Image (spheres, grey):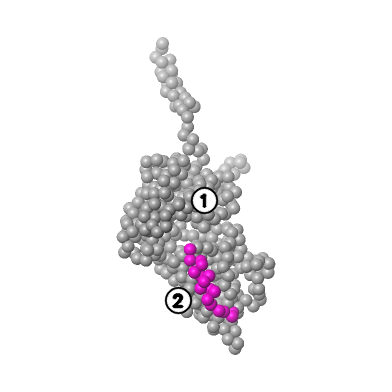
Amino acid sequence: MPFSTTVAICLGVYFLIPVLLYLLVPRDPTIHPRKRAIALVLGDIGRSPRMQYHVLSLVETGFLVDFVGYTDTAPLQSITDNPDIKLHEIKPAENLPLPKGLPFIVLAAIKVIYLTKQLFQILRSLKNAEYLLVQNPPSLPTMLVCYVFVTFISRRTRYIIDWHNFGYTVLALKLGSDKNILVQINKWYEHWFCRYAFAHFCVTKAMAEVLVRDFKVNAFRIIPLPDRPAVQFQPLSDDKRADLLATSPIFSGFSSATDKLVITSTSYTPDEDLTVLLDALSQYDSSSTPEKPLPKILTVVTGKGPLQEQFLKDISQRSWTNVQVRTVWLAAEEYPVVIGAADIGVSLHLSTSGWDLPMKVVDMFGCGVPVLAREFPALSELVVNNRNGLVFKTSDDLAKQLIAVFTMPELLRSIKKGALAECGNRWSETWRITAGPVFHIPNREDLTEVESSGSSDDEY
């Protein structure tokens, strides 16, 4: 056989082998031709708006997304109706039939073991995704589980932490001391295992600085990604506001001509002291006199959580003439509309770390509603005093601010103008520019250049 023929046959076989392997070897069913991401929140998906926005942004840019979390509350309809998003339920440890009276540390250990087993089972079924995006807190057991998953089970997956706060500070609030041994262990755990993440999103620049300074995270892996309102949060037109106030049972008895509407949103947790609001409303009520009457206030409190019963009990013990307080739970689609009807919003969020920001303020700004917000270190990244809202420290401050905004129309108009200016800062564009490169998604400017060059070819 001529040498040239032998070489040709050898080359043919050499190039044929990978083709045969591609055709004959079964593919891993977990590898999909489209990019796939896992979004994990060890919490209620329906009450995790930022993670829902992450998921929608990923899908809009071509990803298939597996969304893992508790399913107590229905998420946005745009998530449940999207065929590219699959929900995976984590069953809460609270459903376990455990004997009463167990010590906290025993209950915590059982819960961690139970959740760890579930998370491994779910993640193993989703291996080979390109990305794993995880909300923090809670950090236990998610950080350890995710580290093991991307190191030993799905090595092609890049692990990204979305920092909403620091888990050990939340635990310190729950246990009443940052010196508690469990808090110290959780702090060490969070510091250690966060270093194995591929990238870190965080809600404030101040939080990014803490990650570098205290957690020793590489600064090049940290991307400040501030909360921005999603598209459903829009200012209400005068006609739509009037129709809502006239028809919704939430506002029964409310006169838009003479009364003022105050709205706050809460999860009824210890980091929001709602008595500050009630005390301020009491002072407002007592400040109204026949000689100098103040507008009547309807305060709508949206949300649900562990301290709600205590709040309702506190309301029942107060007597007001010019103030009403109503509590409601709103579906995800109702919430932006009701928020948009407010004259003023109130944020009582007092960060456990000092470095996160309240999502409720972002939602209010999206609807063009100015905010009275309780002061803490990172708040200035969102609320600028006398520009888009007012900042208070005590119930006395809040009472004075309520009186001021409802008796000084020029003040309310000024901060309303500032809140409306915030409407232009939307989540989708911020996400694409800031987070998109982490997921290898080109910025819109890059896409425009590609589209422009393509259209010029068609013209010729």
- The residue located at (52%, 63%) in the rendering is 304
Residue 281 place in picture, x, y as percent = 53, 77
Q: Earlier in the sequence, mark 2 or mark 1?
A: 1
Name the residue type under label 2. Answer: Thr
SS assignment at label 1: helix
Name the residue type under label 1. Answer: Val
**Viewport quadrant of the C terminus:** top right
Q: Report the disc number at residue 332.
A: none
Residue 434 place in picture, x, y as percent = 47, 54
Neighbor class of circle 2 (other Cα within 10 Å; few <14, some 14-19, many 20+) is: some
Where does label 2 land, which residue? 394
For the residues labelled 2 and 1, say whether their Cβ atoms are less than 8 Å apart: no
Q: Is residue 361 visible?
A: no
For residue 285: magenta?
A: no
Residue 335 place in picture, x, y as percent = 58, 62
Neighbor class of circle 1 (other Cα within 10 Å; few <14, some 14-19, many 20+) is: many
Where does label 1 land, which residue? 55
Q: Quadrant of residue 214?
A: bottom left
Q: Quadrant of residue 172?
A: bottom left
Residue 263 place in picture, x, y as percent = 56, 69
**Mark 2 or 1, closer to the camera:** 2
Left or right of 213? Residue 389 is: right
What segment carries the magenta color?
Answer: 306-322
Q: Is residue 226 above or below residue 386?
A: above
Tell which of 229 and 287 is nearer to you.
287
- The residue located at (41%, 41%) in the rendering is 154
- The residue located at (55%, 49%) in the rendering is 60
